[in-house]
Image (cartoon, coloured by chain):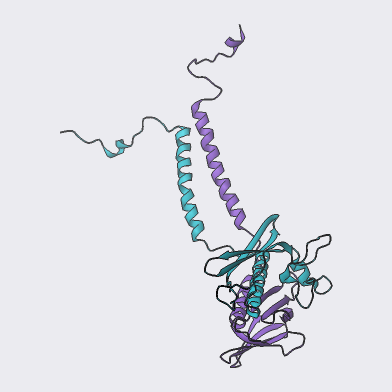
Amino acid sequence: MNIVEGFKLKNPSRVGLVGLDSVISIFLVVTFIAFFFFISVFNEGESLPKNNGIGKIYSDLLEQLNSDLKFASKAEFPDSAGSSITVSSNNGEKVFYFLKDGNLTRENSQGKSKIMINDVKRCCFYQNPSIPSLISVVIVPSNSEIMPFFTSFAMRNWKS
Amino acid sequence: MRQKPPFHKLFACKKGVTVTELLLTFCLLTISLAPLYYLYTLTKKPPERSNAELLAVLLAQHVVEAIVASKISNPESLPPMTSEEPLVTHDGDVRSVSIYFRNLFGKFQGVSIEDDPVLYWAFKPYQCKLDTYYLEDQLYKVIAYISYQEENRQKRVYLERLLDQRIPYSSTPGETSP
């Protein structure tokens, strides 16, 4: 018996180790698995670490500070440590932000106050001497696991 | 007149379904689910921002607002384009601190670990880059990029702003000031 005869198949019309049906089956199974693998990877990419619920508080605070400070014409710092600020706008409206008992509170001209964020360890409003129309705000929460809040606002109506 | 076959015989199958046919059906069903899944992801609310991304957005706002404030103080000033720079000094890093974080709280070299360790460690993972473009109609575009690493992936957020590119008036018509 020569080598060629040794590899001869029983059915001479079929050539190869596996049939067409098996190849298609394998292909379909692989497609099926690949699809679900793609979905799992796609979902994994979306599951980023969450922000301990501070995101909503910081977003609200940012929105409020934006509306108060961006259109302000003057900023005063009653406290030398910079933990409070009085912001005046051109229409005579005044807003007062101050830190009391760990709560950063906003008070408007009518005396209506609202706690913007609680459990604050340190709060600082800072006017940059080289760019006086720029007010920077730093808020450090008591919980050290929560990141600090830091950003700045340019007073659009500022006059030197 | 030809009689109709009974209803239960209409779907009578003489030959059984093969595994290949079954798999093909599953595969087609799976593929048809893909657009439905895509539609589902579109209707879902955007994922919540992580702590790192939230701070990056706040830092980008600081850069843009610092540029706007400089423009209010000096209407002719335009911010320069900068490469990626750290927000605080790093050990062994020769790059200087980004100009937008240098004069914070009266510290020329930016926040140091001795002055404010909380802010220092919060700022350390971030880098700031500014791109600028001259546009038509005397407009100048600035894009502030804040890049950081999260889950071993480099990420960045950006804020862009259009500014007036005011040309200084010359004393004589046709003459431009230097």
The N terminus of chain A sits in image quarter: top right
Q: Quadrant of residue B66?
A: bottom right
- Chain B, chosen colour in render: cyan
Is B112 displayed left or right of B159 in the figure? right
The C terminus of chain A sits in image quarter: bottom right
Q: Quadrant of residue B151?
A: bottom right
Vertical arrangement, residue A47 with respect to residue A79, above or below: above
Q: Nearer the viewer, residue A46 or A70?
A: A70
Residue B168 point in image, percent of width and height: 60, 75
Is A103 displayed left or right of B161 in the figure? right
Q: Residue at image x 53%, y 40%?
A: A31
Q: Nearer the viewer, residue B177 or B32?
A: B177
How many numbered markers are drawn?
Answer: 0
Residue B4 point in image, percent of width and height: 22, 36
Q: Nearer the viewer, residue A99 or B12?
A: A99
Q: Residue furthest left?
A: B1
> Can the viewer see residue B28 in this picture?
yes
Is B77 displayed left or right of B108 in the figure? left
Vertical arrangement, residue B10 with respect to residue A142, above or below: above
Residue B65 point in image, percent of width and height: 64, 74
> Can the viewer see residue A53 in this picture?
no
In the image, which lettered chain appears purple? A
Q: Quadrant of residue A100?
A: bottom right
Vertical arrangement, residue A123 with respect to residue A86, above or below: above
